[in-house]
Every structure is written in C-alpha cells, then in structure tokens.
Image (tube, rainbow, N blue to C red):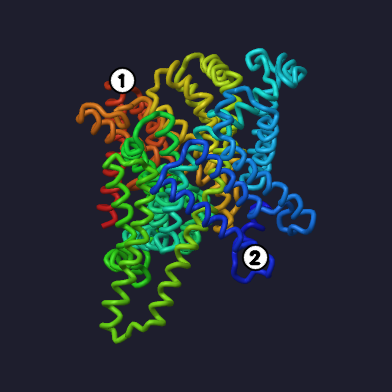
Amino acid sequence: MSDTQESARETADPTGAPSQGRTIAWVIAAVGVALSLFQLYGAGIEPLGLFYQRSIHLAFVMALTFLMYPAFGQRGRGAVGWIIDGAFLVGAITSGAYIVWNLDAIFSRAGFWSETDVWMGILTTVTLLEASRRAIGLPMTIIGLVAILYGFAGPRGELPWLGEWLPGILSHRGNTLDRLIGQLYLGQEGIYGLPLGVASTYIFVFVLFGAFLEVTGAGKFFIDLAYAATGRKPGGPAKAAVLASAGMGSISGSAIANVVTTGAFTIPLMKRLGYRPAQAGGIEAAASTGGQITPPLMGAGAFLISEYTRLPYIDIVLVSIFPAFLYLGTVYLFVHIVALKRGMQGGATEDLPTVRGTLMSGWQFLLPLVILVGLLLQNLSPMRVGFWAILSVLGVAALRRGVELFVLDPRRGQGLTLARLRDEVVAGLRLVWTALALGARNAVAVSMACAIAGVIVGVVGLTGLGLKFSSMMIAFSGGNLVLALILVLIASLILGLGLPVTASYIVLIVLVGPALSDEFGVPLLIAHLVVFWYSQDSNVTPPIALAGFAGAAIAGSKPLETSVQAWKFAKGLYLIPVFMVYNPEIILGGPWAYVIWSGLIAILALAAFAAALEGYLFTPMDTVSRLLVVPATIAVFHPAFAIEASGAVALCALLGVNWLRSRSQAATTA
C-alpha cells in the first residue's frame, strides 16, 4: 500500500484521530455526501446535460482526491503541503466551474477556442494527472503523459523532433497545443468522454448502492449465507470464499476489496482446515476476481460494455450469467479437488450458521437485489434503477428496524420511549451519512481511472493509433485468430501492470476491438467480453498479481507463490473467453439444442482441465490420462461439430475411467 493510500485511510477515519485529522475527515465526508446527493439528484429527480454532469462530477472527485491523499503522504501536509494541496483544490474546482459557467459560449465557439479555453484545458489536464498519481498510482499518470507527448509528436505538432524517433507505423502528423487541448478538455472524446460519462452516471449510482448495502450489513450476510450453504462440505471455508466473493461482486467494484473483506474471514479458516497459506491466498484471489465478472455490477464493466456496444444493460447482465457461472464453478471444483486430495472435512456444525437463521436475520438484503433486477427487466435506465435500488435499501432497513421497535421489542417487554426513538432516528441519519460518504470515496478510484483513460482515448482518436495498432496486430498474428487472442492476452497483462482493470479494458478495446470485430469476424459483444475478461488477468497473473498480493498479505505467504496458485485456480479466466469466440451461441443464442450442447461441453472441458491440473478427480489420475485431457480439451473448443464431439467423447471416457478406478479402489478397500 502506498504512502498516500495509507495516509488517506488514517485521515478518512474520524475516530481516534488527532484534532486536525478529525477535521479533515469530516470535510472529506461532507464533500463526499455533497457529491452523492448531487448524483442522486441527477439520477432520480432531474437528469443533467452531458457536460454539466461530467464536469461537476470530475471536479468533486478531484477535490476529494486532494483531500484524501496529501501531497507528502504519511509525513503529513505541513505548510508546504497545504499550499500544494490548496492550489490543486482550486484547480479542481475551477476546472468544473469554468465549463458550467461558460458552456453556452464554448459551444458557440465550436472549435475556435479562446486563449482562456486553452489555459483552462492545460490547468485541468495537469490537475487531472496529479490527481491520478495520488488516487491510482504513478504508472497510470506516466501512461497519460506518454499519450499526450505522442499526440504532440509529428512534423506539424508541438514536438516535431519527437516524431523522428517514432517507427513508421506509429508516426503521424502531430497536433498543436490548441488542437490537442481542445480535444482533451472541450471535446466529447477526451477527459469528459464516454468513460467518464459512464463513471459519473451508472457506475457511481451502483457503487453508492453497494455502499448502502455494505453499511447496513450486506457483506456479513453474504458471507454467512455462503458459510451456511457450504461450510459442512469438504473444504467448506474455501467454497464459502467462492460463493461469498460472487455475492460481494454484486456490491463491490474491486477484486482487491473483495480479497480484504471476505479474505479476512475465509483465509484463516482455510489455513486452519489444512490448505497451505499460498493456496488459501490464491483461492481467495481467484474467487474475488470472479466477483468482477459476476452480474449485475461486474466491476463497472457491464455499463461500459453497454455504452460501447449500444446494447441494453440488462442484455449484458443476462448474457454474462452463464460465463460467470462457468468461472466460479471451475474455481469451486479446484477447491473441492484440493479438499478431497488432502482428505479434508467440513466445519463443525456448531461453529456454522444455518441457512434458515441467516435468511431470517438478513432477508432484507435480498429484496433490493430483486427490485434492482425487476426494474432492469422493465427497461428502465440503469441510472434510474440504481436510484430506486438505493431507496429500496433504505426502505427495507427502516421497515426491519420499525418491526423490531414497534412489534417485537414490546413483546419482549422492552418499551419504546421518546428518547429511544430519538436515538434510533439519529442512528439512522448517521448510517445514511456514512453510506453517502463511503459511496463517494469508493467511486474515486474508478472515476479517476475513467478520466485518465479519456485522455488516452482522445489521443488515440486524434492520431489514428487505433487503426495502426489493429494493423500491427493483424501483421503479428498472420491472420490467425488464436495468435490474435494470445496477443490480446499479453497486451492486457502489460497494460494491467500500470492501469486499473477498468482503464485497461477501455484502452485495450479502443486499440484491438476494431481488429477483432472487423478483421477476425468476432461478434462485437463477444469481442468486448473477451477484452473485458482478459483485462482481469493482472489480478491473478504473475509477476504482478494485485489480488494475489493482497491474499498473500492476509495469508502470510510469499506473494509470488500465492500468485502462481491464484493463476492456476483462475484458469477459467483464460479458457472461457476462447470458448465464447468459437462457440458464440452461449452468448448470442441460437437453436436451443445447440446452446445446451455448447453449455454442457464447456462444463465438461473445464472440469476435465481442472482435474488434469490437480491430477485428481474421483481418485488420482495417471500421467497418460492427464496428458490426453489437453488435446481433448482443445478439440472441444474447435468450431467444427465433429471435432468438438470427438473431444467431448474422449473427455467423458477419461473421466469415466477415473470414476471406475475410484469404484474399484473403494470395493477393494471395503
């Protein structure tokens, strides 16, 4: 964890902090509450214009960033720090205020920008880069700077000498300061472009929805429910980690956040049950990554895919259910196999919650999710759906507490006094305040990532880099789709070293999306899903596996060893997108018989591959069987029906032999 992030955690905690830290914490909370109320107003009362919504949102988010992350990190602000932070705070507020105040005049100039426009664009860009450095790290800022320098490089640009260093395929004519700043600050494909537009509308409202669920206890409810369902089975805590992470994926936008929340409970229990520390951390990292591809939130990806493909959000959610089931089922199977190999037992009954008791104590957390899905099926705007979902959380929480106060407590002999009623109202208002502030703080990182990604997207559009990148991809792959997918995977891993998952997806889809769709014939929706899934691999792929590192910190294991385990358990992240490409029916639909067939062979292939990697299913697998699984799995992924059918038959035969051996061994033992 960086110094600025650690300092922000300390500053944002109003309890137990010194006087100055407590004051800053309340200022952060107040700004966060103001941002959340502004977003709720736009979501449910009166929608705002494009530039009004995005510019005000970004001004709020950058102001929060400079309050949460001091210039000098843990060392405190001091006089110099306050001067620096104060200057950037003014820049953040001014950047949004200028557009809001002068929007009509800016539109009337229509590309003939004034000198003030250009200087305000420079101020906003510099402020954004510094906010990005503090909120999401230096690598993202460097990539943004490189994109800007690339935009200036060329014979007609501000940096003609830099263009001489570019290879021929990457060269372009260059851009003047006015042209580039106009694109980034005042254009619809720059800072205030589509990525920030999605972050300032759909993503924020659903992150705020997750914050309301979190403060009312939904996280504990999902974990308890997972334990109640799986805790008595072999490897129960590890299986609970998989299910709990899927549940938390509905309300969390970060794999690392999933690891540190569910992992704090599941990893110690997995270690106690017999899993090695690296295995426990790797299982949690792989399961938490699954939360990012699990509807309805999908780590903000569903909203971005919907905007880029122009498909309804509910369609993205529905087609993503089965692939998410395949991924989480694969991780679950890995966990089960490891438990069988080690002869693990389930948890003690007296130590585990019951499904009935858990549902009785937390049924109210399911109602907002049901309302959310129901409203989406009515084709309401996701932003409006999020607004009503938030109100439903408040409504069911108030209803539950009201039943306890006015019905259950009097039956227990506890009278309701005016003082107690006042305390309950105050507690409720504090909970709302906390949720509003927490939602704003949780949205800072993704909003900053989308804003800086807008810089990259703006430069790509201005220089034509996307078409050139597609040409390079076709040249390197030789027109072979498998090689092209491998190149996408490598590019996503490299981008993931410096960019958050959301930004990695945005940049990569702009660069390789046209090639996948236009040149290789991959359907548009599947191309987006492939890139989105591959953008998750930086969470679990060595040498930089962010979720794996978080799991290692909790498990007390070596980061690299834990990352290797996470990479193994997350194999579905690499195989399922390939299956989507060669069997598009599981996403786009088709004849029911073929859709069911495709789903069944996908389950079969992933189960066999997991068994081959672990060398165990019903009983230990011999080396020959494990090796034969590989070509059979490849055959199942082949688009020709005869080949995939032969691969499925081979897998069934291999697994059937393993089952017969287990029966024979059991009979011999008996």
Which x, y percent locates residue 83? 76, 52
Q: Nearer the viewer, residue 526 or 52?
A: 52
Q: Can you tell which quarter of the image residue 327 is in?
A: top left
What residue is rendered at 33% in x and 61% in y?
395
N-terminal label among 1 and 2: 2
Task: Identify which residue, 336 or 318, lies in the foreground.
Answer: 318
Residue furthest to the bottom: 413
Q: Report the amino acid beneath label 2.
A: Thr
Give residue 190's position: percent from left, percent from top. Answer: 57, 30
User: Total label count?
Assistant: 2
Residue density around tag 1, few if under 14, some if 14–19, many if 20 or more, within 10 Å: few
Q: Residues within 10 Å of mark 2 (few under 14, many from 20)?
A: some
Say whether residue 556 is left or right of residue 194.
Answer: right
- Does residue 71 sit above or below 496 in this rendering? below
Res 323 seen here: yes
Q: Which mark is residue 23?
A: 2
Q: Which residue is mark 1?
A: 640
